[in-house]
Amino acid sequence: LIRLTHYSDHPQLYKAQNIKSAPYGEDSVLVAWERIPAESPEKNSTWFAVVNKNGTVEKAPEEVKDLDKFYNSDDFFTFPNGDIGWITGTSDYKLKLYRLKPKS
């Protein structure tokens, strides 16, 4: 068992919420979260990272700017071909399906 207890560049400045994960490729996990600045909570952002089965960060956390916010109630799932997906509601009351393709 590998325990990742904290991964943040400045824990006193940010907090994470709506943390999600899904299998990614053969031996990794995609981790996604919403990063909330302590000083400006309304300026949240969406971040992704990839961690392997040994707990090693394979792809450093990266902000993804062109996504609608995902919520705590949104579930990530894996398509039969290995793609990762989730469905979320948008600000204009529509449903949106996201689909990410794992690395080769």
Image (tube, rainbow, N blue to C red):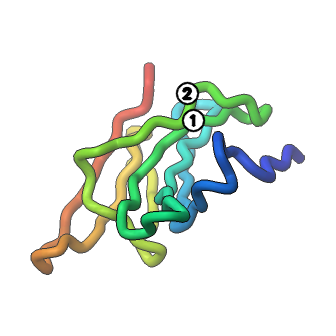
Picture quadrant where residue 7 is located: top right
Can you give x and y, in whole percent of width and height, for residue 59 in the image? 55, 27
Regarding mark 1 in the picture, which secondary structure is present there? Answer: strand
Residue on which the image places disc 2: 59
Name the residue furthest front: 39
Picture quadrant where residue 65 is located: top left
Q: Is residue 9 above or below residue 77?
A: above
- Mark 1 surroundings: few (<14), some (14-19) or many (≥20) residues within 10 A: many
- Mark 2 surroundings: few (<14), some (14-19) or many (≥20) residues within 10 A: few
Do callouts 1 and 2 mark residues in contact (Cβ within 8 Å)? yes
For image coordinates 44% across by 77% down, the residue present is: 73
Can you give x and y, in whole percent of width and height, for residue 69 in the image? 32, 63
Q: Quadrant of the C terminus?
A: top left
Which amino acid type is marked by label 1?
Answer: Val
For image coordinates 40% across by 60% down, the residue present is: 44
Which amino acid type is marked by label 2?
Answer: Lys
For residue 57, side relative to residue 37 (left or right)? right
Considering depth in this image, is 24 or 14 the residue closer to the camera?
A: 14
For residue 86, side relative to residue 91 (left or right)? right
Q: Which mark is residue 50?
A: 1
Considering depth in this image, is 65 or 72 the residue closer to the camera?
A: 65
Can you give x and y, in whole percent of width and height, for residue 67 in the image? 27, 52
Q: Which mark is residue 70?
A: none
Q: Report the number of discs.
A: 2
Q: Earlier in the sequence, mark 1 or mark 2?
A: 1
For residue 53, side relative to residue 42 (left or right)? right
Name the residue furthest top: 104
Regarding mark 2 in the picture, which secondary structure is present there? Answer: strand
Q: Is residue 41 above or below residue 51?
A: below
The residues tagged by marks 1 and 2 sit, at their Cα atoms, a distance apart of 5 Å
